[in-house]
Image (spheres, helix red, strand yellow):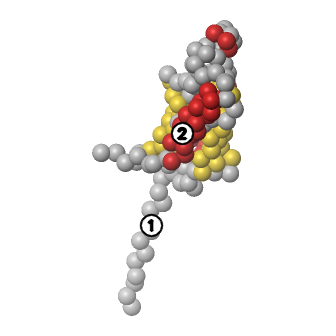
């Protein structure tokens, strides 16, 4: 059974969205008939796991073109930046519900010193960005022989 790290902020964000909808309805706003497009700060969900040779980060980035993703490492900090744009084909008033977030995002991850930054690779497939961070070969301790006199 896999251990999943508990993230209380995800539940708080969901609760805040529900409260916003309730308050919007009670103040005469609209809910199902023409919700506002959610723009602004959002963060894609990520999975981070470690293998014997590397650390892998997988980020969910559906409907984001590769040209809109910026990936860089600076001072042992990996930063994924980008933007999800709202399709202009459908007018806002024609939507019944909009639950996905649009706008720019940024996620940063502190990298351990054991990462080979020059060999990092990234692949985007089916809306999932996979960043592979290879580990440096561990320096083996040198055995020192003690000479008896």
Q: Which residue shows up at 64% across the image and 17% down it? A: 34
Query: Disc 1 and disc 2: Cα gap in Å?
Result: 52 Å
* Residue 109: image location, x then y, percent: 59, 47
* Residue 138: image location, x then y, percent: 47, 57
Badge 1 vs badge 2, beta-carbon distance below 8 Å? no
- Please state, as top left, top right, bottom left or bottom right, where the N terminus lies in the image: top left
Query: Which residue of the protein is positioned furthest toward the left in this rendering?
Result: 1
Foreground residue, 103 or 48? 103
Binning the other alpha carbons within 10 Å of mark 2 as few (below 14), some (14 to 19) or many (20 upward) gives few
Foreground residue, 73 or 28? 28
Q: Which residue shows up at 54% across the image and 39% down it? A: 15
Q: Which residue shows up at 61% across the image and 27% down it? A: 25
Q: At numbered mark 1, what does the secondary structure look like: helix, strand or loop?
A: loop
Name the residue beneath numbered marker 1.
141
Residue 70 seen anywhere in this rendered image of the structure: no
* Residue 135: image location, x then y, percent: 50, 49
Snapshot quadrant of residue 80:
top right
- 3 with respect to 125 (left or right): left
Query: Which residue of the protein is positioned furthest toward the bottom in this rendering?
Result: 149
Name the residue beneath numbered marker 2.
15
């Amino acid at each position: 059974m896999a251990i999943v790290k508990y993230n209380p902020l995800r539940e708080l964000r969901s609760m805040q969205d529900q409260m916003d909808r309730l308050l919007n309805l009670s103040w005469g706003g609209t809910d199902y008939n023409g919700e506002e497009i959610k723009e602004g700060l959002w963060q894609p969900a990520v999975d981070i796991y470690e293998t014997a040779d590397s650390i892998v980060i997988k980020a969910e980035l559906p409907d984001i073109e590769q040209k809109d993703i910026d990936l860089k490492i600076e001072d042992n900090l990996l930063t994924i930046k980008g933007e999800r744009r709202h399709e202009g084909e459908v007018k806002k008033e024609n939507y019944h519900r909009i639950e996905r977030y649009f706008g720019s995002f940024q996620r940063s991850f502190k990298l351990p010193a054991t990462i080979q930054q020059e060999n990092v690779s990234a692949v985007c497939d089916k809306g999932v960005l996979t960043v592979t961070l290879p580990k440096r070969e561990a320096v083996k301790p040198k055995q020192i022989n003690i000479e008896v006199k």
